[in-house]
Image (cartoon, helix red, strand yellow):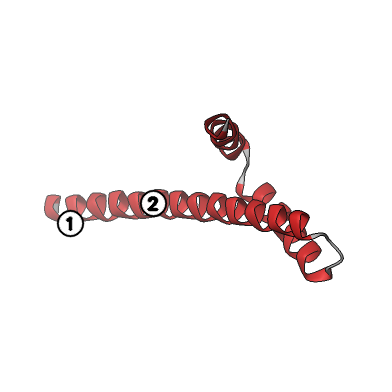
Amino acid sequence: MAADTSTDAGVEEAALGYEQARDELIEVVRRLEAGGTSLEESLALWERGEELAKVCRRRLEGARARLDASLAAEHAAEADEEEDE
């Protein structure tokens, strides 16, 4: 059954955008900081927060990779132009 849960989490993770994951993570942190939840609920919130933090980190890493690739292509094009002159 754990395999089904991780598969579902992977599908859900793929569907979450950065902003959605960030906003949900903020809400999880707010609820944990407010207290008043049972130990079991606090653990579930913590685990969800960890998943959301991973989603955010992966989205940011992907965005950074796209930016780096774009900058590298731009620099390569500039270098080619300089060689042609």
The disc, 2 or 1, on the residue closer to the chain's N-terminal end is 2
Around disc 2, counting alpha carbons within 10 Å, would you say few (fewer than 14), some (14 to 19), or many (20 or more)? few
- Residue picked out by circle 2: 65
Task: Give the amino acid at mark 1.
Answer: Glu
C-alpha span from label 2 to label 1: 26 Å
Counting the numbered discs, the total is: 2
Q: Nearer the viewer, mark 2 or mark 1?
A: 2
Q: Left or right: where does residue 6 sit relative to residue 49?
A: left
Task: Give the amino acid at mark 2.
Answer: Ala
- Judge whether 4 appears above or below 42 on screen: above
Q: Report the residue that reaches farthest toward the right.
A: 36
The quadrant in which the C terminus is found is bottom left
Q: Under tag 2, what secondary structure? A: helix
Q: What residue sits 51% from the left and 49% below the top? A: 59
- Residue 44, x across and y down, in percent: 70, 52
Q: What residue sits 58% from the left and 40% below the top? A: 13
Around disc 1, counting alpha carbons within 10 Å, would you say few (fewer than 14), some (14 to 19), or many (20 or more)? few
Is 62 in front, or is 9?
A: 9
Is 70 in front, or is 5?
A: 5
- Residue 84, x across and y down, in percent: 13, 50
Q: What residue sits 19% from the left and 55% below the top? A: 79
User: Is the residue under label 1 in contact with that under label 2 (CB below 8 Å)?
Assistant: no
- Residue 38, x across and y down, in percent: 82, 59
- Residue picked out by circle 1: 82
